[in-house]
Image (spheres, rainbow, N blue to C red):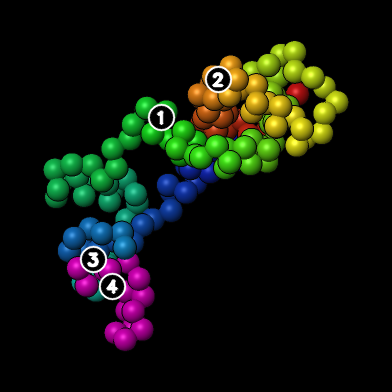
Amino acid sequence: MSGRNKVSEYDSEPVVFCARCYSLKIKYEEAIDAECCMDCGCSDVREASIEEWEKLYEHRYGKKYVVRSNDPRKTPIFKMPLTKLKMYVYDHPSLDYIIHRLYPRFPKGLSKADSVILLFSSLIRDNRLDELRLLLIKLQDNGREEVKQ
């Protein structure tokens, strides 16, 4: 299933929210044998689609709950520390595609670990880490976790 389909499927699930403050922080409280809001304590909870809830929230507070940004530098991939980025690339199903997209003449026949070590050594030397991050975001956004080789 592509990334966009997963998001669409996830967004189709109804959300439970506080009828008083519209918080999504709802939990079951055994003491009262009911769900209640973790922010204001109200036990009046409602259910709606995420789109309906966003409209209600915006109408009440005059602003969106989440302001989406198209700035790739604010994504988790750009904020990822180098060690985690290496593991993310190492575990990525399109590792070979990524390597050869960034370095078409990259040596073949290396182990997976050696390839990642050499890739990051080259990226750091050539100051191309941002290029790698942008490629990873593009693959993620396009739902192309598995690129045919």
Q: Is residue 105 above or below residue 3?
A: above
* Residue 45 visible to an observer of this rendering: yes
**CA gap, disc 2 and disc 1:** 14 Å
Q: Which residues are magenta?
A: 26-41
Who is closer to the viewer here, 7 or 109?
109
Marked residue nearer the N-terminal end (2 or 1): 1
**CA gap, disc 4 and disc 2:** 49 Å
Marked residue nearer the N-terminal end (1 or 4): 4
Quarter of the C terminus within the rendering: top right
Q: Which residue is mark 3?
A: 39
Q: Kindly indicate the quadrant of the structure image that contains residue 63.
A: top left
Q: Which mark is residue 36?
A: 4
Are circles 2 and 3 on residues that touch, CB within 8 Å? Answer: no
Q: Which mark is residue 128?
A: 2
Who is closer to the viewer here, 128 or 55?
128
In the rendered image, residue 20, in percent from the top left (x then y), is placed at: 17, 63
